[in-house]
Image: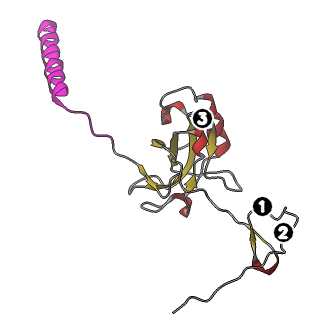
Amino acid sequence: MTRWTGLLTVMVLGAGMVGCTDATPPAKVARAQVKRTGPATMEIIPVEGQLPYCMLFTMSEKGVIRQLTLTRENRSIRCDPNRPVANTSFRVPVQEGKVRVYIFFSDERVPAGSVAQQLYDLRDRERVTAMDLRLPGRIFVETLEFTPETGEPEATGVVVGAGGVVTSDGGTAPDAGTATLSVEPAAN
């Protein structure tokens, strides 16, 4: 009787193995997307069906790790689907090169400090997964890439001298603020 039981067990397991080899692995579903908003700026947009909280980190080719979602409590933030994270664009320094964007989705607000430390410890890995982290609750990790490009030089403001004159030297020239601006009416 044991021979027949053993033979039947082998046949059932063998039939199950044949069925497994025909199955194709499920396609990887993206949890978020990067949207370029400028030469060196991006938005991260979670797709529908993700866990409600997230935090963002970037790691550059030069090894610089930046936390993009920094709050007073230093915890993950609410991330609504199909809306930019934190309703903002993030600027990536061009001199640091291409970055990997790590998006950590969670079912509860997670302290960012421990994630930052663990990400730093795992910086030499090609890929970081949720299994690599010691965090509470359910965690999903999405890794995306973004390459900043040089574009128009950004102007953050200029020095305005007397009479509303813009000084290109930052107001350090001896005659700064003494120049006049003449406006000629356009000929009709």
Query: Which residue in the rendered view is the most extreme toward the bottom?
Result: 188
Q: Are marks 2 and 3 in contact (CB under 8 Å)?
A: no
- Main secondary structure type of the part rendered in magenta: helix
Q: Is residue 174 left or right of residue 50?
A: right
Residue 16 on image: x %, y %: 17, 24
Q: Gap in Å between the C-alphas at discs 2 and 3?
A: 50 Å
Q: Earlier in the sequence, mark 3 or mark 1?
A: 3
In the rendered image of this protein, does residue 126 appear above or below residue 29? above
Q: Which mark, by number, is residue 169?
A: 1
Q: Residue at label 2?
A: 176
Residue 35 location, x and y as percent?
A: 44, 55
> Residue 3, labelled with which disc?
none
**Residue at the spot x=18%, y=19% of the render?**
13
Amino acid at the residue labelled 3: Leu
Q: Tell me which residue sits at (39%, 55%) in the image.
A: 49
Whether label 2 touches label 1, CB < 8 Å: yes
Q: Position of residue 62 (x, y in %)?
A: 60, 33
Residue stretch rendered in magenta on the structure: 1-28
- Residue farthest front in this picture: 187
What distance separates the C-alpha of mark 2 from that of mark 1?
Answer: 8 Å
